[in-house]
Image: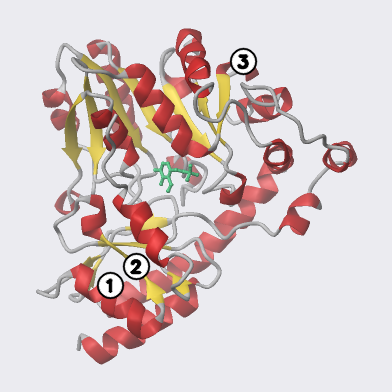
Amino acid sequence: MRLRNFALERYFARWEFKAELLLCASDVEGWPMGDLLELASEDDRRRWDSLRLGYTESAGDPDLRAAVAELYERISPDDVLVFAGAEEAIFALHNVLLGPGDHAVVVAPAYQSLAEVARAAGADLTRVELHESNGWRLDLDEVRAALRPNTRLILVNEPHNPTGALMERPTFDGLVELAAEAGARLIVDEVYRFLEFDPADRLPAGADALPAGVSIGVMSKSFALAGLRIGWVATRDHDLLARLAAFKDYTTICNSAPAEVLALIALKARDQVLARSRGIVSANLPLLDEFFGRWEGTFEWIRPRGGSVGFPRLAGDLPIARFAEDLVHDTGVLILPGPIFGDEGNHFRLGFGRLNMPEALDRLDSYAARTLR
Ligand SMILES: Cc1ncc(COP(=O)(O)O)c(C=O)c1O
């Protein structure tokens, strides 16, 4: 298996801990350890203090799987397999489900591994593009046209990175129908689920929508605990889960014991944890509305409907990669140029899950006033 470089992760490797302010991070501001432990029940606090640092159950701690299952309507603890982040889940899923002779339909632009691991596993890929001119909406006709007799899976990401788009319920229902008719598995990367700006817009989970549907979840984004490296696959397809479990024996074998306990504490207190994340995002959004209102014609943006990222466009001739490079050198503010997502429309990813977003945005504002007016 030959994987191409993960452009976004290589860019972050260069800048994430060097740039002063990240205006492009996709995770919500991470919890301080002490604050998280304060959410623990007495039992869980004891569990934390007396934790033995041996190997853990390969499928994931049973209590953690039960807490994950609570996030779904039709999922039981046995339908959950815990991974080291969503990234390991994606890697395992594509490797288990795809090989030469198989075909996969993947939304684009997208978090690179969602397509790249499928390609590297030997599958033929069709990327169904989202377009700004269409409000970044998925076009079901394009998905239908992409289907082939050997299409094994359709993969979408809702809410979507990098655009912040979230499909309407009828589109989701149509997609479920299409997948069922085609005998293709629907995989939904739901790492930004629960961050819908209007909770009424929350879609059913992939794992709930279809017996063989798959949900990919993680503690990193909506739950603001990226450092735990705890993610999961939820599906009622136990044959798939068994194959994934066997694959995991060659990657991480089992999860980090401390991370599992901390994830359990967070999920048991999920209302508080999610309220904090939504609070951060909803404090930042009006500042973005004001910014993009004032800079109309220079920066164009389709307001996201969920998640913690959006994909604005720099109008004019200045290439976004050049602008981003000059911006970080001059102001210490990092944005992610669209070409990293294979985008050629001069977009950039902007993240609004961090507490210091107002300061980062201020610096972008003054830099733009100095250089773009
Ligand atoms: C859509 C999507 N899926 C998966 C991941 C991977 O999540 P993690 O790094 O927590 O494994 C990310 C991270 O940015 C993402 O945006």
- Left or right of 301? Residue 221 is right
Q: Residue at x 20, y 69 (%)?
A: 320
Q: Looking at the image, which residue is at 14% across and 31% down? A: 142
Image quarter of residue 173: top left
Closer to the N terminus: mark 1 or mark 2? 1
Are dots 3 and 1 in contact, CB under 8 Å? no
Which residue is the site of mark 2? 335
Circles 1 and 2: CB atoms closer than 8 Å: yes
Q: Say which of 240 and 277 sits in front.
A: 240
Residue type at mark 2: give it: Ile
Please state which of residues 316 and 172 is positioned toward the viewer in this rendering: 316
Q: Position of residue 291 (x, y in %)?
A: 35, 76
Instruction: Give the structural element (helix, strand or loop) at label 1.
Output: helix
x, y (%) of residue 111? 33, 45
Q: CB at mark 2 closer than 8 A to ligand 1?
A: no
Which amino acid is tagged 1? Ala
Q: Is residue 55 left or right of residue 253?
A: right
**Residue 87 at x, y = what percent?**
45, 38
| Mark 2 residue element | loop
Q: Gap between marks 1 and 2, in whole Å?
A: 6 Å
Marks 3 and 1 sit apart, C-alpha to C-alpha, by: 45 Å
Label 3 lies in ligand 1 vicinity (Cβ under 8 Å): no
Residue marked by disc 3: 78
- State the image coordinates of residue 16 (x, y, percent, origin top left): 44, 64
Please, what secondary structure does the residue beneath circle 3 have? Answer: helix
Marks 3 and 2, how far apart at CA: 40 Å
Q: Which residue is mark 1?
A: 324
Against 241, residue 350 (above or below) is below
User: Crowding near pointer 2: few (<14 within 10 Å), some, many (20+)?
Assistant: many
Q: Is residue 296 visible?
A: no
